[in-house]
Image (tube, rainbow, N blue to C red):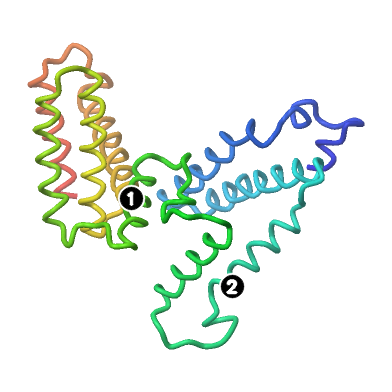
Amino acid sequence: MARLRDPDGGCEWDLAQDFASIVPYTIEEAYEVADAIAIGDPAGIRDELGDLLLQVVFHSQIARDEGLFGFDDVATAIADKMERRHPHIFGDKTTGDVRQQWEQIKADERAADGAKSALVGVAKSLPALMRAQKLQSRAARVGFDWPNADGPRAKITEEMDEIVAAPDDVARHEEVGDLLFAVVNYARHLNVDAEGALRDANMKFARRFAAMEDRAGGSLVGLSLDEQEAHWLAVKASEALS
């Protein structure tokens, strides 16, 4: 990477990049790792982890070129953090709640950095469902939470009624957002990862839709809704039997 970004004979494209310009690639590579894991492809996981590692190297080289830090600094920082957050492994042995200890250490780190809100550090660039769940979990740590799943379940019904009563598209947009937030909250209380659940639902829909197209001879174009529904039900039935 240092050679690729060498002003004397390096790659023009690599030299033109900065932290912000390669963020989309970094995010994309992380999702490609997740895809390879989801389909159980060890060779793919290896290759995609390499692509993701390249992004870390790329960012680190940009930082080194600007005199900020280097790859070794990145590796040292995460090693130090893991040791600091696992005192029961790397430091004095403790008999307390390890999870609670982990959260307290993270809270202390945020406080040391000057963070006053419990929500500080939840990345704004996270997928919306994932960020919603993390925000809710952070709020729950300080006691701002429903006592059980009944609260968020009732909130879903309330938000659906508010969508129907919304006077315009702007209000409807806001209420749909509130509904999605409530659904994530309900999922959290059921110990369901909302982002992962929706990802699996997307994959299931894509798989079933492709099977519908196969049953219809390659395309659903021209079929009535009833005919399409018949194919959908047949696909679901065949999955249930397999």
Residue shown at 22% from the left, 58% from the top: 189
Distance between the Cα atoms at labels 1 and 2?
A: 26 Å
Residue 114 spot, x, y in % from top left: 56, 56
Extreme residue in the top direction: 222
Examine the rendered structure and indicate whether residue 184 appears above or below residue 214. below
Q: Which callout, 1 or 2, points at the residue further toward the start of the chain?
A: 2
Q: Determine which residue is flagged by label 1.
A: 133
Examine the rendered structure and indicate whether residue 2 appears above or below residue 116. above
The answer to whether residue 147 is left or right of residue 6 is left
Residue shown at 54% from the left, 71% from the top: 85
Residue 2, picture quadrant: top right
Type of amino acid at the residue the image marks with label 2 = Arg
Secondary structure of the residue carrying numbered label 2: helix
Residue 138, picture quadrant: bottom left
Quadrant position of the N terminus in the picture: top right
Residue 27 spot, x, y in % from top left: 53, 40
Type of amino acid at the residue the image marks with label 1 = Gln
Closer to the camera in the image, 17 or 94: 94
Q: Determine which residue is flagged by label 2.
A: 84
The answer to whether residue 1 is left or right of residue 146 is right
Secondary structure of the residue carrying numbered label 1: helix
Residue 83 spot, x, y in % from top left: 60, 73
How many numbered callouts?
2
Examine the rendered structure and indicate whether residue 108 appears above or below residue 3. below
Closer to the camera in the image, 207 or 93: 93
